[in-house]
Image: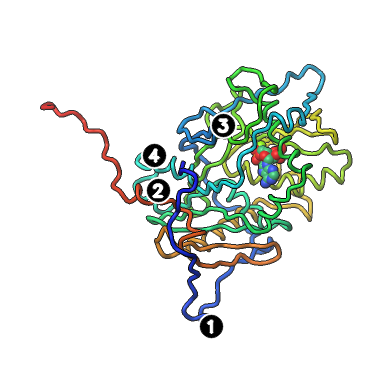
């Protein structure tokens, strides 16, 4: 990980103005769902290339030490009774959200594995590298009515890197997050603690701390249309009893949601929450989302498994539902738009893609701080030749 406070390139922000504003109107990309309702595009079955872990101090380790094991409560006729507020705030160690990590952890993994990437020598040069969470936001954009986003893009050695920039509105919301919302965030992580063990076949230990610095991340390869993808995403746990033991099909995503009591509440859940759950898990090929439904007092008394590939069925016949084709076609269109916009290969040049609900995606161009996000240690190491493979001993050696 890049040490905190390391400079990412000196210099003041420079907005590069187009030479001729009249003959070159700024390109933009519309986001209306109706424009993207074609057939479902090609999406390669995601395969895991590797993984990494972040420890309680948010330090990087190139292994699976932070992976946890799915360990649901015994089904003995009674439902669970998880108190999600237990331990708050005394046994809560939240991650410092002021630290902007950008793609740093993923870049470290990539640097350490660039010599062993499958797909041939030129594969990385044609790929998009990003976080799964950024792709999730792209997938849900045609249906999003509340939160906008900004994605910074830089091309380096052919590869297009995409890294999210916190919008001013998101920052303001984060800094004024009401105490109830902070506790609700804790409760999502507490649910993970009730459902996961540290060892396969072990039991959860809800007496410990909830430390959100700790993360296990899977690094995956896929392709959307003609866009090769390399992305990393946090994985909640692996199921030691999954029918197929290899990642990502053994992974399980855990979620909490309010208990529902009326068909109207379920409909709204299918329309809004299930879209986000689907997008997040479909991208890395995680087959199941296990939901804990909480009472107003914060107790999870029932669990339900939602297979990712069956989520769309809940809205297929709903005029106000969502459509996976729209999500994936929009994402493919955005990737083409970004590939065609970011032409110059320069790690210090940033095209900032901005979107607010109701409008199109727009672009502005920047150089160096504060938007440049590829760290010097990465650019310099990637500019060196690949480390040569270990020498095979010759008979005279
Ligand atoms: P829930 O999943 O129960 O909402 P994830 O589910 O993606 O693994 O994230 C785990 C928990 O992190 C969430 O629990 C929620 O508590 C918190 N979280 C994740 N994304 C968040 C966001 N954008 N805003 C607030 N809390 C978030
Ligand atoms: Mg989760």
* Residue at left offset 12%, top offset 26%: 395
Disc 1 residue: CB within 8 Å of ligand 1: no
User: Gap in Å between the C-alphas at discs 3 and 4?
Assistant: 22 Å
Disc 4 residue: CB within 8 Å of ligand 1: no
User: Gap in Å between the C-alphas at discs 3 and 1?
Assistant: 53 Å
First-in-chain label (3 vs 1): 1
List the residue tagged with mark 2.
378
Above-or-below relation of 203 to 155: above
Please state the total of marks drawn on the protein image.
Answer: 4
List the residue tagged with mark 3.
56
Quadrant into which the C terminus falls: top left
First-in-chain label (2 vs 1): 1
Name the secondary structure under disc 3: loop
* Residue at left offset 85%, top offset 36%: 296
User: Gap in Å between the C-alphas at discs 2 and 3?
Assistant: 24 Å
First-in-chain label (2 vs 3): 3
* Residue at left offset 61%, top offset 54%: 166
Q: Which mark is residue 112?
A: 4
Front disc: 3 or 4: 3
List the residue tagged with mark 1.
22
Residue density around tag 4, few if under 14, some if 14–19, many if 20 or more, within 10 Å: few
Name the secondary structure under disc 2: helix
User: Gap in Å between the C-alphas at discs 2 and 1?
Assistant: 38 Å
């Amino acid at each position: 990980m890049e040490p905190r406070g390391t400079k990412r390139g000196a210099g003041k922000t420079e907005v590069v103005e187009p030479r001729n504003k009249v003959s070159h109107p700024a390109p933009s990309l519309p986001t209306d769902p109706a424009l993207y309702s074609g057939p479902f595009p090609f999406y390669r079955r995601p395969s895991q290339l590797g993984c990494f872990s972040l420890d309680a101090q948010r330090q990087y380790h190139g292994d699976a030490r932070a992976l946890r094991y799915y360990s649901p409560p015994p089904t003995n006729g009674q439902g669970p009774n998880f108190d999600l507020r237990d331990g708050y705030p005394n046994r809560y160690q939240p991650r410092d959200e002021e630290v902007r990590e950008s793609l740093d952890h993923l870049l470290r993994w990539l640097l350490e594995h660039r010599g062993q990437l499958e797909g041939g020598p030129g594969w990385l040069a044609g790929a998009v590298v990003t976080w799964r969470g950024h792709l999730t936001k792209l997938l849900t954009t045609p249906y999003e009515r509340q939160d906008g986003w900004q994605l910074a893009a830089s091309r380096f050695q052919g590869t297009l890197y995409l890294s999210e920039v916190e919008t001013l509105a998101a920052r303001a919301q984060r800094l004024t997050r009401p105490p109830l919302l902070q506790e609700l965030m804790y409760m999502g992580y507490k649910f993970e603690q009730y459902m996961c063990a540290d060892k396969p076949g072990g039991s959860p230990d809800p007496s410990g701390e909830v430390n959100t610095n700790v993360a296990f991340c899977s690094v995956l390869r896929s392709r959307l249309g003609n866009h090769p993808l390399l992305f990393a995403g946090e994985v909640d746990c692996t199921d030691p009893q999954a029918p197929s033991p290899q990642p990502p099909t053994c992974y399980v995503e855990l979620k909490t949601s309010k208990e529902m009591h009326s068909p109207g509440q379920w409909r709204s859940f299918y329309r809004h929450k299930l879209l986000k759950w689907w997008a997040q898990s479909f991208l890395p090929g995680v087959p199941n989302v296990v939901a804990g439904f909480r009472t107003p007092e914060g107790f999870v008394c029932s669990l339900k498994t939602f297979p990712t590939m069956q989520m769309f069925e809940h809205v297929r016949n709903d005029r106000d539902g969502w459509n996976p084709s729209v999500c994936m076609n929009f994402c493919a269109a955005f990737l083409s738009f970004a590939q065609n916009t970011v032409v110059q290969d320069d790690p210090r040049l940033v095209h900032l893609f901005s979107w607010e609900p109701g409008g199109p995606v727009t672009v502005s161009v920047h150089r160096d701080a504060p938007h440049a996000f590829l760290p010097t240690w990465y650019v310099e190491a990637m500019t060196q030749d690949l480390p040569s493979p270990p020498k095979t001993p010759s008979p005279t050696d």
